[in-house]
Image (tube, rainbow, N blue to C red):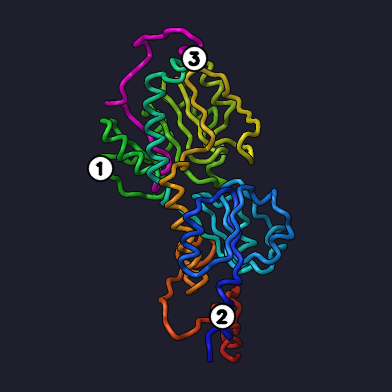
Amino acid sequence: MSLEKFSYPKEKIKILLLEDINEEAKRVFNHHGFPNIILKKEPLQDINPLELSDVHIIGVRSKSKITEEVLLSSPKLLSIGCFCIGTDNVDLKRSALQGVPVFNAPFSNTRSVAELTMALVVMLARKVPFHNKMMHKGIWSKTASQSYEVRGKSIGIVGYGHIGSQVGVLAESYGMKVFYYDIVKKLPLGNAKALPTLEDLLKISDFVTLHVPDTKETRGMINKEQLSLMKKGACLLNLSRGKVVNLEALKDAILSGHIKGASLDVYPEEPSKKGEPFSCPLIGLDNVILTPHIGGSTVEAQVNIAKDVSQTLIEFIDVGSTIGTVNFPEINLPRKKGCHRILHIHKNVPGVLSKVNAI
């Protein structure tokens, strides 16, 4: 008997990719026999809910909010792909209860974020924001005052994961002394040195750069108290999550002269669309660099993300493998020709599998 009698035809699987996901994702799906791809530039909030009723796979970036309401209005949904690192915009608990695994791309934009971090470190050290501002006003501001090399300076990395560790590698190539703090014990790369507490790191670092996830523990972890522990004249960078830093406290620390400069790529509240107005307490301050969440926004990173997330989604649909999911147990199942695999997702209730075997 043909497997088509059991398997849902690939050409009928509807895949909705939102937020201008790189077209490489479509090419990967097409190559594996999935022709029904819809590409949209809008986030999920701007999509008619009726369009979700027959969607099997949804692909999003960081602006789309996949809430319980969205999940309940998507009865045919099989999987969600977050074409980014973060998954805090998805109701992971509800997704799991609905049997919908969520996949992301934790490695694909590592280099892009690390490179931007180091570029910002150098610009803060050389007061590039101030000089750029003066030049655009037609004022020749040449001076060596308060401009320094980064060689020999110390950089403290908070969160020594994929991105943080690569920042350390790049910083060491600049001749910087690398320190890091992580709640999980991590092996150092190169000559990086782990410190036992966040406070220890803040006290000795000329540059503090944050690369942590958005969790209950990390929200507000850099506040007035932590800023006061930093070296006078130090700089703070946040390319992780917007709620990690208290921006009003950071503004006060900069205006007082205790903190020399700062660079932010993420914010507590971010516009959902390109071109929308943006507000931040640090707007207009000297030696402050504000970028619109572009850490991973390079052509190379977006192509890699498109390939990686699409491939994990295909592996789940074709085989049932859940490697790379953030809300399911990870299993890696082999491909087998000439057979059909039944994947039953249940809540670990005794007797369920025996009922499946009785079919």
Q: Residue at 47% across / 63% down in the picture?
A: 312
Q: Is residue 302 above or below residue 315?
A: above
**Mark closer to the chain start, 2 or 1:** 2
Label 3: element kind: helix
Residue type of the residue flagged with mark 1: Gly
Residue type highlighted by circle 2 = Ser
Q: Residue tagged by mark 2?
A: 7
Give the main secondary structure of the magenta stretch: loop
Number of the label disc, if any, that sits on residue 190: 1
Q: Which residue is mark 3?
A: 136
Q: Residue 324: where, in percent of width, then height?
A: 46, 61
Residue nearest the observer in this picture, 204 or 40: 40
Q: Which residues are magenta?
A: 134-162
Instruction: Check residue 228 in the rendering and tell me which mark sits there, or answer none.
Output: none
> Where does the C terminus fall, quadrant-wise?
bottom right
- Residue 30 appears at what percent x and percent y? 50, 64
Using the image, determine if residue 294 lies above or below residue 344: above
Q: Nearer the viewer, residue 254 or 204?
A: 254
| Side (left or right) of 337 relative to 290 | left
Binning the other alpha carbons within 10 Å of mark 3 as few (below 14), some (14 to 19) or many (20 upward) gives few
Q: Does residue 147 belong to the magenta stretch?
A: yes
Tell me where residue 263 appears, x and y as whole percent: 48, 29
Give the secondary structure at mark 1. Answer: loop
| Mark 2 or mark 1, whichever is nearer to me | 2
First along the sequence among labels 2 and 3: 2
Q: Is residue 210 left or right of residue 75?
A: left
Residue 76 shows in the view: yes
Q: What residue type is disc 3 on?
A: His
72 falls in the magenta region: no
Kindly report the distance in space between the C-alpha atoms of the residues bearing marks 2 and 1.
50 Å
